[in-house]
Amino acid sequence: MAEENKKPEVQEEVELKTNVAAAEELATPDSIEEPKGYASPAQANPEKFLKEFNWHNYEEGIDPIDDDKLDEFEKLVAENFVDTLDDEVVEGTVINITDRDAIIDINAKSEGVISLNEFRYNPDLKVGDKVEVLIDVREDATGQLILSHRKARVIKAWDRVNKAHEDGTIVTGFVKARTKGGMIVDVFGIEAFLPGSQIDVKPIRDYDAYVNKTMEFKVVKINQEFKNVVVSHKALIEADIEEQKKEIIGQLEKGQVLEGTVKNITSYGVFVDLGGVDGLVHITDLSWSRINHPNEIVDLDQKLNVVIL
């Protein structure tokens, strides 16, 4: 009788365990439907998810990803990480600047570092600036990418220099040093030559005063065979002067009286600077009486009142 009384209890226990197992099976993550509109952490903020992801554990198999999530993960990587191929120039963002280096985010698994020496031409570099970089070393001992801004500039430099020459556009260059007959200028990462005669419209004696300065130039000559580039700052000044002349001439009227400065004296007359425009006063118009040479009555830098004829 005692054994007969125990059998129902065992049966009830078996049934209870079966029900618990069934309930646990129903409660597994695979069987729970996500609410409509639900976004996983990876979907909600893919950049944050990938930045904080433990790549070491994943690559070592410590934190494996199940097959159902692998496709989604690979898609996130493809959409949010650049493909850091060798010899490929990519754009990065400066996220920090130390005493020696600039830390660059190129949207890869790790951040990159570039020596500040490569930005000598741009002393105003700041956090948030966009820069072109080349992957120099994929990862150093600390896990950082070693990037090169200089190499990235050189790769694209010749296309840019040639286009600037063809279009006549103004380029910005950094004067690195003086050399025989002129200056060495960094333009797009290429060392260009600035002849001393092309620095200014006036003769320049102190070349050193221009070293470490950022200036604007016009590309005036390219030797494709020897990869030589010649630039001019004087050409830009002359272009500005021509524009000023046109503006001044457009305002001049016949009979108008102006004050000018004697700029040059010749045998046939004097050239007077009228504030950007040179006017000629013929020797016969300098004096009521006859003179043999203008220097008899005028001197350089002398002020004269003249009439526009």
Image (cartoon, rainbow, N blue to C red):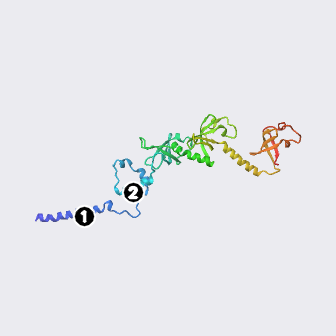
Category of crowding for the residue at label 1, using alpha-carbon neighbours closer than 10 angstroms: few (below 14), some (14–19), many (at least 20): few
Residue drawn 36% across and 48% down? Answer: 59
Q: Closer to the camera, 258 or 25?
A: 258
Q: Is residue 50 above or below residue 286?
A: below
Q: Position of residue 2 (x, y in %)?
A: 11, 64
Q: Closer to the camera, 61 or 249?
A: 249
Return the disc, 1 or 2, that comes first in the chain's sequence. 1
Left or right, 190 with reference to 139: right
Q: Position of residue 286 (x, y in %)?
A: 85, 42
Three-letter amino acid code of the residue under disc 1: Asn
- Count of labels shown? 2
Residue drawn 67% across and 38% down? Answer: 197
> Disc 1 on helix, strand or loop?
helix
> Disc 2 on helix, strand or loop?
helix
Left or right, 235 with reference to 154: right
Q: Position of residue 111 (x, y in %)?
A: 45, 46
Q: Quadrant of residue 202?
A: top right
Residue drawn 60% across and 44% down? Answer: 172
| Residue 72, disc | 2
Marks 1 and 2, Cα distance to the nearest angstrom? Answer: 35 Å
Category of crowding for the residue at label 2, using alpha-carbon neighbours closer than 10 angstroms: few (below 14), some (14–19), many (at least 20): few
Residue drawn 76% across and 50% down? Answer: 249
* Quarter containing the N terminus: bottom left
| Residue 19, disc | 1
Nearer the observer, disc 1 or disc 2?
2
Q: Which residue is outermost to the front?
A: 225
Q: Position of residue 133 (x, y in %)?
A: 50, 46
Left or right, 53 with reference to 134: left
Three-letter amino acid code of the residue under disc 2: Glu
